[in-house]
Image (tube, grey):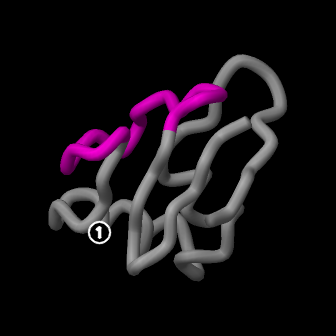
Amino acid sequence: MIEFKVEGEFIHMIQLLKAASLVQTGGEAQIVVTEGRVKYNGRIDYRKRLKVKPGDTVEFAGEIIRAI
């Protein structure tokens, strides 16, 4: 599990995937989200601009990111 400290109120899903080094570019992050390969709090979510807040979890490529 990756623990990611959110600076401020939230971080957008695509920014989080890039910041956690699970994708190389923002474009790649947009693709994996629109393809339904990312789970937000246990459910597949297609929103690229989704606001991930402390306490949320994001799953992608066998990794779990917990926002703190």
Residue nearest the observer in this picture, 23 or 65: 65
Vertical arrangement, residue 45 with respect to residue 54, above or below:
below
Q: Position of residue 66 (x, y in %)?
A: 61, 47
In the figure, is residue 46 to the left or right of 57? left
Give the quadrant of residue 19.
bottom right
In the figure, is residue 24 to the left or right of 38? right
In the figure, is residue 57 to the left or right of 66? left
Residue nearest the observer in this picture, 24 or 5: 5
Q: Residue furthest front?
A: 1
Amino acid type for the residue under numbered disc 1: Ile
Q: Main secondary structure of the magenta part?
A: loop
User: Dot 1 corresponds to which residue?
Assistant: 31
Q: Which residues are magenta?
A: 41-56
Density class for disc 1 (Cα within 10 Å; few <14, some 14-19, many ≥20) is some
Instruction: Look at the image and tell me in which quarter the N terminus lies.
Output: bottom right
Instruction: Look at the image and tell me in which quarter the C terminus lies.
Output: top right
